[in-house]
Image (cartoon, helix red, strand yellow):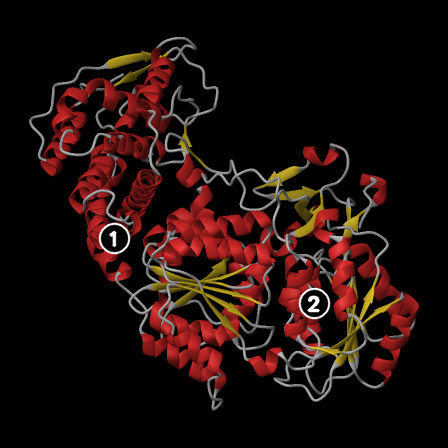
Amino acid sequence: MYYQYLLAKRAADPGKPEEGQTLLGHTKFVIRTMSTLKNLLSEAIQELIQGEISGSAWQDCALAAAWLHDLGKANDHFQRMLRDPRFRQGARHETLGLIVIDDLLAPWLKSFWDRHPPWLQAAVYFAVAGHHLKFPDLQARGGQEITFLGSHPDLRNILELGAHHLQLGSPPALSDRSYSLLTFGGLRAAVSSLKRRLAQDFSDPQKLVIAALKTTLMVADLAGSTLPVHGQDIPHWLVTRLQIALEPQALENLVSKKIGKQSLRPFQQEVQESDSSTILLQAGCGAGKTAAAYLWAAKNAAGRRLFFCYPTTTTASEGFSGYLQEPDFEAILIHCRAQVDYRLLDYMPEPTKSEAELRALQLEALDTWPIPAVVCTAHTVLGLLQNTRRGLYAWPSLLRAAFVFDEIHSYSPRLFQHLLRFLQVFRHAPILLMTATLPPIRFRALQQICNERGGLIVIAGPPERERAKRYILKRSDEASAWQQAQETLQQGGKVLWIVNTVARCVAQAKMAAAQGLPVQPFHSRYRYRDRLVRQQTVIAGFAPGKPALLAVTTQVAEISLDLSADLLITELAPIPALIQRLGRLNRFAHIPDDPKPALFVTPPDPRPYSQEEYDEPALRRWLELVADGKPKSQQELSAAFCQVSENVGYDADAAPLHCDWLDDPWSSLSGRHALMEPSYTLEVVRQEDLALGSLGELALPLPIPKGKAWQQWQFQGRYAIAPSGTVLYDPFWGGEYAREHTGFEII
């Protein structure tokens, strides 16, 4: 079949497509985008790849990748598929394009490849193959053969486009070429042969060049596809947005508004003035680390972007709303539920002008490009290393950013490995790491990696606060704990009781309610919008001057609740978790008048922690050092932890970290290697709730049930739709499976 136009995108009328819908027009737009990006990002790219190739070689390869990236769409299957959605193509265009470039254009392109180191040809090939994260194509597609439409006039124009930009000779006259899709021979054999020929022992710097080229092509394709559709001039839009950077005075003003007339503490000044590219700030809860971070950014993010990375969506939202109400610059919150938080939380700032513009133009994928300050979860940034789209699409901003990673002690072992790899790869980026305390083995790992970055500077929090006698720690049985809780409540105090499982949390809270105590439960198994309400209710209830209150919570209190209790009761848990929980006790006073009591109760079993995480021998030794009924400081808790927990936070049997973005140049796939250890929860939405709001605000995290019946549930994205009656729910107490449906034991 003859096609008047070769298309790159589906068109309402294939006989009268818009320019960006044609293969020629789309290629022009992507080349135009790449031409702008290669200039805007050239300095940052050279800093990243450390001069592994020259700037001119980088720019040549970037243009070549942009020109060749969709050549494989000139085939009969792809063109028919765009005109008939029912038709299934027998091969992806990236696969065919890779073979066509090598098979039909190799003699013509030889003069271009000869200008550069031989391995750069492979780099361009890998970028072309991987720009959709679908290579190698692992789907069984069927079909007999596929035909490359080499004789089409549009293809000649595309080749001449490349000849002009790359100073090539006159392009060859191509004819149509068919490739077999059968199991043996044809396209599959050609791909296998090419893989063997391109296989090299690429050095780490070369792998980084390849990853950077792939990612730059991906974002050029994204912008070149979306901006023209909305009437945007590509160079003007990119230049005016990507050149926005932070000004030191604006960040200093931000801190001044927050701390008012208070003087900066010495450690904050030290952080602000440090010239090190890598700082570890170790300070207890409530010391003023966030203010120090923005002061650090005033110097280190000046002329750059800033990514402020938190461990969870909750802490990211709290950090965003706490500091960025009315800054002198644009800032954006990015995580999987950010839009729900914008809509449901009263204290959230309004979306910025640029954010509103992007949403109106349906350009949300470019949301970090015009906005210089991003508050997000660590997964947003570290996800780049595993080819997550959010991280990849932020590439132009990440390249020229400074980074703050908060609460790094709370990272899982695997996420911490990704942080180390990020430090290694982005070795010239200014990075501030913050934590209350860090296991010795993690500290040594940071030191080793940071030797390649010029060393690690460690700055401690205010010594008078770190040494202040804040806690009196004791072991206790549950009956004695209840008695002391009731006495504290009778005196108008605030009690925080943290248990390790949802089942015990709800049981304890119901027991307190039955006794007429003022209790508020809080755990993870609420609909997201109800969880926001629960959290704010607990925080508000602990405000000074409010009546006595008992909050019974799970681990969600460790890093997401900004409150100060008069009595903390907690089940035993891993030592870092206990130190974090103690951060909710006697929290706000810089130097408290008197220490407050904390009681440690032994749980019936370690769940949900593994035996390795729980580490009972180390926990027992730590308790012997600190739970002696004598006043203790944050510094003493950390020192005891370091003394007994040599290997906490490290899995000696863990396989070496594989990063899909870097470690396998041939392959470009997403989702093969997770940032975190496997999760055993489902994001469940009750069928009864579907009419009540968006799936994001109705999602309820629940353990994966036993059996296979749940696998037959309907899924909408990552959300499992639980049939009516399957999940019991109360906005106050939370949700659980109806046992008659699942037989699941709730912990």
What residue is rendered at 81% in x and 55% in y?
Answer: 503
From the top left corner, tell me how far across and down residue 431 is, in percent.
Answer: 41, 62
Amino acid type, mark 1: Leu
Q: Is residue 77 left or right of residue 688?
A: left
Query: Which image quadrant is residue 254 in?
Result: bottom left
Number of marks: 2
Disc sitting over residue 41 in the figure = 1
Check the image and name the residue furthest to the bottom.
261
Where residue 410 sits: x, y (%)? 60, 58
Instruction: Name the image quarter holding the N terminus.
Output: top left
Residue that label 2 marks: 581
User: Residue, x 69% and y 81% (percent of image)?
Assistant: 469
Observer-side mark, 1 or 2, equals 2
Residue 158 seen anywhere in this rendered image of the structure: yes
Q: Nearer the viewer, residue 516 or 13?
A: 516
- The residue sitting at 45% across, 83% down in the picture is 257
| Position in image of residue 212 (x %, y %) | 32, 43
Question: Is 294 left, or right, of 314 in this rendering?
Answer: left
Numbered disc 2: secondary structure: helix
Q: Is residue 441 left or right of residue 238?
A: right
Mark 1 in CB contact with mark 2 (< 8 angstroms) = no
Name the amino acid type tagged 2.
Arg
Quarter residue 545 falls in? bottom right
The secondary element bearing badge 1 is classed as loop
Relative height, residue 262 to residue 119 (above, below): below
Q: Which mark is residue 619?
A: none
